[in-house]
Image (cartoon, rainbow, N blue to C red):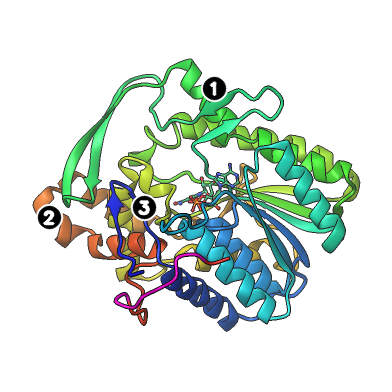
Amino acid sequence: MIIRPKVRGFVCVTAHPTGCAVNVQEQIDYVNTQATIEGGPKNVLILGASTGYGLSSRIAAAFGCGANTLGVFFERPSERGRTASPGWYNSVAFEKQAKAAGLYASSINGDAFSNDIKVQAIDRIKADMGKIDLVIYSLAAPRRADPETGEVYRSTLKPIGSNYSNKYLDTDKKTIQMAELEAATDEDIRNTVKVMGGEDWELWIQALKNADLLADGCKTVAYDYIGPKITWPIYKEGTIGRAKLDLRRAKKAINQTLNSIDGAAHIAVNKAVVTQASSAIPGVNLYITILFKIMKERGGHEGCTEQMSRLFRDRLYNGSEVPVDELGLIRMDDWEMGEAIQSAVGDIWPRIETDTVDEMTDFVGYQQEFLRLFGFGVDGVDYEAEVEPEVE
Ligand code: NAD
């Protein structure tokens, strides 16, 4: 079949297998141009391994460190003529390339929040890998069923304390609109923490430790975002920010669990990038389009691969202490949050209107990256060619 993008708001409901495979290959090529990371991990478990930061972490581990990887994700295979989700195609492409490079690579498609998937992962690790020396926690999910009670919790993106209105970019119409968001209830906050907070990260580490599958000196990393003040009402100080604060609580608890094996839990604050998760946050997409314009002009622009390659090389496996800020966080957003960059963004933000979107933002670059997430607009791919949507 010939596959075209079908964009519905902030998602594209189709994905192109060849385009996704080329995206993965380009990430691998980038990591291969970097020097091999000495002392890197050998057996890595990546939770949320199929897209965004998790996929790039998997590529950095495998191709930057020569690691065996087990990836866990929740993706849709192709069915009845519908294309698979991009994370499915990405993972097929990743496994093929990793195996061709002589690396063990295996994947589990299912709900990482469930006990069943934890048991499956533990069985697979026992059978194929031995002990794990790095666990990446990169899930971004809209809902979570509590593994004990079965109760389903939904995360929300809401401000806390009062209603909030701010500019956002309607990417379909290329217009600046005002988003009106109602303040979260206490229940919204609790639910978001339940889904995107640290509880499930703790459960994974505890389960792996109980099964004696964590190597001495094992590291685990979860991802966070802080961003500039203009996004704080919806991000850092909103429901999602509360969930991210809960990661810090979980980090402490996990550090205690890992104490006896000299392991360490970290939180890496990553840069804003275009992913399926970030494109759903009102206002954050407008900030990203401005940020990209400035960072591309001034240098230092990075995508997921560059960020994760730098995280592994300069932070986690730099041959000495992992550098952290005064709150104990690894700051991969250091370039994004640089004073000059933020002051340039802050200068544009109040002036941006519909008729200045092209001039003041990297709208074109944002749209290209968004479509690329689904395998479209990738150089060298013939989109007029027939392609088989079902790939195993
Ligand atoms: P993403 O949407 O690209 O990836 C999410 C991953 O989670 C996918 O692999 C998906 O399959 C998996 N997943 C979702 N629900 C699952 C479930 N129930 N079971 C198993 N797997 C499941 O997201 P992303 O933007 O890469 O975000 C990953 C992490 O990075 C999040 O913690 C996010 O807050 C953080 N982060 C993102 C940005 C950004 O700008 N995108 C910036 C900083 C930090």
The amino acid type found where label 2 is placed reads Thr
Disc sitting over residue 190 in the figure: 1
Name the outermost residue toward the front. Answer: 80
Viewer-closest of 364 and 13: 13
Find out whether residue 384 is within the magenta segment: yes
Mark 3 surroundings: few (<14), some (14-19) or many (≥20) residues within 10 A: some
The amino acid type found where label 1 is placed reads Arg
Q: Please report the bounds of the magenta region as a residue range.
A: 383-390
Label 2 residue near ligand 1, CB within 8 Å: no
Between label 1 and label 3, give the one nearer the viewer: 3
Disc sitting over residue 356 in the figure: 2
**Considering the numbered disc 2 on the image, is that residue within a helix, a strand or a loop?**
helix
Do the residues bearing badges 2 and 3 touch, measured as CB atoms within 8 Å?
no
Taking the spot 19% from the left edge, 44% from the top edge, the residue there is 350
Between label 2 and label 3, give the one nearer the viewer: 3
Residue 292 position in % (x across, y down): 33, 61
Quadrant of the snapshot with the N terminus = bottom left
Mark 1 surroundings: few (<14), some (14-19) or many (≥20) residues within 10 A: some
Q: Is tag 1's residue or tag 3's residue first in the polypeptide sequence?
A: 3
Taking the spot 32% from the left edge, 22% from the top edge, the residue there is 182
Is residue 117 shown to the viewer in this render?
yes
